[in-house]
Amino acid sequence: MDTWIFLGTLAAASALALRAFGWAISGYTPPPPRDDLQSVERFHRDREGETELDLGLPWLSTDDVGAQWHLWWIAQTGELVGLRTPAHPPPPGPAYNSMARMRQAQVHANLPYSGMKVLGHLEHRPSLGLCQHLRELPNGLDVLCGGTHGEDRGEDCGEITS
């Protein structure tokens, strides 16, 4: 009889845990899609041989809520290039399964990404200290280059001092 009580309690606890997990992930929404990004393959094909300096991940912007950016600075042109990924990975379910399939096809993909674009220009590479400070801010990308639509507006990031 004690075994059945234990199994019943275990089943009830499992059901409650699954219900709580379902409630916790029900609010997930991926960042909205954008049509101003190039595919990663096309972006790299157009820019072979350029020296890029990694400015790290995650960079956040107030004009692209729910997404984070991985930035590079191109030494030859001074361009700031960004790779857009969701700020949070999708929970288990259809979106998670498609991410797992993508990881199998691309060894280095940890998060699904939606594309790359030039975010602006800087004459000089930002310092490591400045990058670390700005990555901690919720508007670090806005401070660095005016957000994620800076290149669309034809604006220059200006001079950033460390």
Image (cartoon, rainbow, N blue to C red):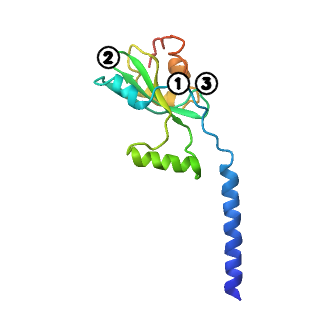
134 vs 9, nearest the viewer: 9
Q: Amino acid at mark 1?
A: Leu
What residue is pinned by disc 3?
63
Q: Nearer the viewer, mark 2 or mark 1?
A: 2
Residue 156 place in picture, x, y as percent: 48, 11
| Quarter occupied by residue 47 | top left
Badge 1 element: helix
The answer to whether any part of residue 1 appears in the image is yes
| Residue count near mark 3 (Cα–Cα under 10 Å), binned few <14, some 14–19, many ≥20 | some
- Looking at the figure, which quarter contains the N terminus? bottom right
> Which labelled disc corresponds to residue 52?
none
Q: Residue furthest bottom?
A: 1
The answer to whether any part of residue 91 appears in the image is no
Residue drawn at 54 percent across, 26 percent down? 140
Q: Amino acid at mark 2?
A: Gln
Residue drawn at 36 percent across, 21 percent down? 74
Residue 108 place in picture, x, y as percent: 39, 43
| Quarter occupied by residue 73 | top left
Badge 3 element: loop
- Residue 43 left/right relative to 94: left
Mark closer to the chain start, 3 or 1: 3
Residue 20 place in picture, x, y as percent: 69, 58
Residue 22 place in picture, x, y as percent: 67, 55
Separation of residues labelled 2 and 1 (CA atoms): 21 Å
99 vs 5, nearest the viewer: 99
What residue is pinned by disc 1?
141
> Which labelled disc corresponds to residue 76?
2
| Quarter occupied by residue 124 | top left
Badge 2 element: loop
